[in-house]
Image (spheres, rainbow, N blue to C red):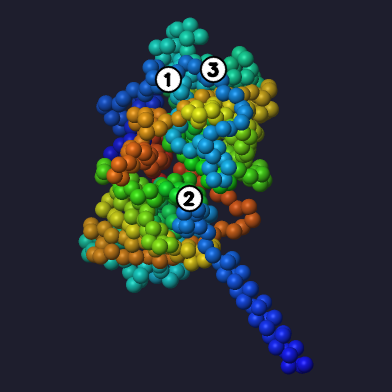
Amino acid sequence: MARQGLLAIMAAAAVALSSASVQAQEARQIPRLATGHPDFSGIWQTLSEADYDLEPHAGRRDAPPGPGVVQGGAIPYLPEAIAQRDQNREARAKEDPRLKCWVLGVPRGVYYPAPFQVFQRENDLTLVHQFGHQVRTIATNGSDHPEEAGQELWLGDSRGSWEGDTLVVDVVDFNPETWLDRAGNFHSEQLHVVERWRFVDPDTIAYSATQEDPKVYSRPWTIDLLLHRRRDANFQLIEDYCYTLEYEQYYPHKDGQ
Amino acid sequence: MMAPHPLTAALLLAATASPLAALAQSAPESVMQPPAGGTHWSKEVPVIASGAWNGPRLADGQPDVQGFWSNTISNHSNFTDPQAGPPGEPSDEASLPREQRAPSRVSDPADGQIPYRPEARALQEKFARNFANPTAPEYIEPLARCAPAGVPKSFMWHGYEIRQYPGYVVLLFDSGSRIIRLDDSPHMPKRVKLWNGDSRARWEGNTLVVNVTNNNGKALFGRYGDFMSENARVEERYVFEEGGKRFNYVATFTDPTIYTRPWTATIPARRYTEADEPDGWHYDVHRVNAPGETRHEHGERICVENNGPFGGGAVGVPLDGPIISR
């Protein structure tokens, strides 16, 4: 009798356990579009220190310490490009394009420490970055980059495709004005970025970006970081055009000023 | 300086009609004139009644109004006499009898004028007087500095795109963008003031009804300096025609601090599709690069002058150094 009771309890516990794990599994299923592709809609932000310096660094006056997000630790600059990086780094307190509220570019906008919102349809993703309110479209309609090359875009031209549940985005046609971080890491107009977006769980994206630029780097190099869903109650982006701050004081009309 | 981006050219193109052209130091020699008259600008404002929507819907039930749109009567040079030109530079049509031009965008009150309080009218008139020869930073039209065009000027400035998602309508303008939430969550706290305000919306049949609060009043409505203050509330009604080829933007402005009564603006728009020829103003698109593809897409919307001095430079506003320290 005692033994039977124990078995019954164990059986009940086993049922409870397995249904709990099924529920847990369902809860961990990633969101998907009607087409079955992962649905990255939502508001995302990195917790990483990538924007301060992509490479490993100790804490300093203008950056918290960070383990770095570059595979292998260092960006493989060509010897002749290092001087420009050093010059940028020296002047970073004035010359970082972010301080002038310029468009951050790709991939920097993704790991800049401010939220961005993804809106997704079958044929494209729209990324609205809070900083500068810049908008980037990633086409997922099977199209290729425009035939007109050399437009030197701020965000490049993004074409995405699916490898299973991973969104792979090919980005080309940049201008050389943007930096990769606050530490002066940079690229030329020959930058070519391949991003990979993949869910780790419903609230976390593993993001990687491979940079290739024959004018600046000796070989392609890759960064890896996580993006977290902003789940604060009723969270929304707050427009931050930023470049308007210099002249906002003059409007609207004021009496006698 | 970079080579002019298409958007730079478009901005300059619009500016050539005004003395602001003098500020555009890198204006290309062969700037096209903005489309005026003919097939591009109409004098008529169609009547579109609110009612049921019998057209296509998205999976979430919203009327499907996605795509490219542009206003049909004029740019933002003149809010109340849209085809008469900016201050100090009357258009050719300005000398015609008034009824031969498009009506005022002010559809209520009937006199077509914004019912300003006297002190607000004086401020608007001061801006208009100084627009042609700005001697102080506050007389520069903010759009000339790539400021977001805001409410309602965005609907008079270049073509734009509507994208829809469950819970959202997203408007992509050449200067600024708007994320409109389709829910009744609370607005941002009052002290947060924004160029495009904070929007909450719902669909009523063929009409998207949007409440816009948290306005900063800075964008102005156009070159005559018409404006709202940061106390304004705006109720926008986007009334879509049966068939989805047109809509009227009908917005009621309530702001007791500068108006004597609420008033309403009406701005007509039409849809652009792959059947239309791309142009640099209403429909600045290129063909999607895929075999057999007929659809069009828009390039990145970045006003290059975000990233350097433009109008502001002429009156000594430094724009080439750090703006933020965060």
User: Is A220 situated above or below B34?
Assistant: below
Task: Report how far apart the C-alphas of labels 3 and 2 lie in the structure.
Answer: 38 Å
Please state the horizontal and vertical placement of residue B179, each as a whole percent of the image.
54, 43
Q: Quadrant of the N terminus of chain B?
A: top left
Query: Going by the picture, which residue comes out furthest to the top?
Result: B97
Nearest-to-viewer mark from 3 and 2: 2
Q: Are marks 3 and 2 in contact (CB under 8 Å)?
A: no
* Residue drawn where x is 43% and y is 14% of the image: B90
| Mark 3 crowdedness (10 Å alpha carbons): few <14, some 14-19, many ≥20 | many
- The kind of residue tagged 2 is Gln
Residue sitting at x 52%, y 37%: B56
Is residue B256 visible in the rendered image? The answer is yes
Chain for mark 2? A
Q: Which residue is mark 2?
A: A120
Q: Chain of mark 1?
A: B
Residue at 47%, 54% in the rendered image = A35
Which of these two is toward me, A92 or B295?
B295
- Asked whether, in this view, residue B32 is left or right of residue B161, the answer is left
Residue type, mark 3 in image? Ser
The residue where tag 1 is placed is B41
State which mark lies toward you, 2 or 1: 2
Circle nearer the N terminus (3, 1) = 1
Task: Provide the residue designation for mark 3.
Answer: B104
